[in-house]
Amino acid sequence: MSTTDRVVPLDGTSLTCAQVSAIGSGRATVTLGSTAAADRSWRAATALAGPVYGRTTGVGANKDVAGQQGLDLLRSHAAGAGPLIGPERATAMLAVRLNQLLRGGSGLDPALLPVLADAINGRAVPPIREYGAIGTGDLTALSTTALCLLGEISWNGPTFPLEPTDALPFISSSALTLADAALALHDLRRLLESSIRITGRTWQAVQASTEPLAEPVQNTHVAAELRAILPTTTPRRIQDPYGYRAFPQVHEAAFTALQNAEISVTTAINSALENPLIATEALHNGNFHTGPIALTLDTLRAALTQTASLSTARLATLMEPAYTGRLPFLAATEGASGLLILEYVAQDALAALRQLATPVTTGSAVISRGVEDHAGFATQAARACLATREPYEIVLACELIAADRALSGPEPDRPIDIEAARRRLHSPD
């Protein structure tokens, strides 16, 4: 990260997944851009007349019940369960929510905006618990945060006197879901790029044919990257297994899925998705629904599992003398186990990836007396994407260790430091 990235200006229009990651990890702070859009929305909200969902009525099945729930709405919804989320996710959530509020549309008091910026820069962490959302708004997480701002729940951040009319506007967002997705996407892009470099090392180790990478065959990012790092050699075989021949196609599909997810998530973190949306009037809507985002995240996890399976296939070839010209399992002596155990570790991690690839979008939920009759479960899709980072990294680390051994020569059996190989994946060789 360059020094110019250390401060991220939030303006409601240009926040990226990479910036969300930098803010969440503490590598960057935030500064406020123009608050004009938020100011306009607030002025419009103060001038509203007639019934407005959540302001002059109840919520959910109580939408037709007149009367203001106000701050009691926050108290009733601050009911998450499970372990507390970590500071990275909590800070990223605050950044996403602040950026959305700057977009305008919530009708919330803009005096809150610099307070949220101070909370982010001060690494204030609301005590948010893991479970409590189904992709139609992170109501428990944001209600807990709101009560922290009110001083009703203890935290290490500032306080702010939210008005009763600010209650629903503040929590009408999937900011935690989007933050989780942004964090996952940033890290998975790095791992997908690392996979190309590792595949290149394996390619050299077995002297695989580069014909599948020829520009007339594959004019893609993945093929071009491999062409750039692989020397011109005479292939040993007329053609190689799918772990090599099909890698450009399968891995490019993973990049395409990642790009589609990034577009979906980036659009959402730079949009006013509140219900109702306060423009010149209150516009009741369903833009808070994250079903489209869940679809892209489901696709990404499936694509990730496919390309990881090719990594385990290449690892298998590195165990074979016919491909490496060395002893089985890249052992130093006949009959030794060498790197055999890497296949067990990689297959264990791949099995975890297959489980995490189970789509969330095939399910739904009907709650609040049937008024809320669908859920996209993007929350669960984002969590699953976060969880894929570890097993995918382990699969790649196993291939990297074996490729290095095949290129450098056999070594006596000793404990294999897979964790050290994982650390190498965080920066190019």
Image (cartoon, rainbow, N blue to C red):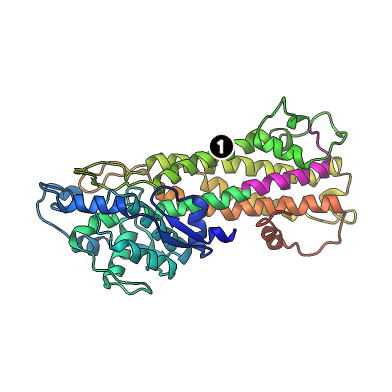
Residue 247 visible in the shown view: no
Which residue is depicted at the point 20% across and 47% down?
369
Residue position marked by numbered label 1 in the rendering:
256
Residue 320 in magenta? no
Q: Nearer the viewer, residue 174 or 393?
A: 174
Q: Is residue 315 left or right of residue 369?
A: right
Tag 1's secondary structure?
A: helix
Q: Position of residue 289 (x, y in %)?
A: 33, 43
Work out which residue is located at the far top of the displayed protein and give it.
216
Q: Looking at the picture, how far across and down is residue 214, in whole percent?
A: 75, 29
Does 29 sit above or below residue 409? below
Tell me where the magenta segment starts and ends, as one range: 192-210
Q: Is residue 116 above or below residue 317?
A: below
Secondary structure character of the magenta stretch overall: helix
The image shows a total of numbered marks equal to 1
Residue sitting at x 34%, y 42%: 364
Residue 68 visible to the viewer = yes
Q: At which x and y percent is residue 356?
A: 52, 48
Left or right of residue 77: residue 253 = right
Q: Quadrant of the N terminus?
A: bottom right
Q: Quadrant of residue 232?
A: top right
Q: Amino acid at mark 1?
A: Thr
Task: Give the image location of residue 55, x and y in percent.
Answer: 16, 53
Left or right, residue 402 beside residue 60: right
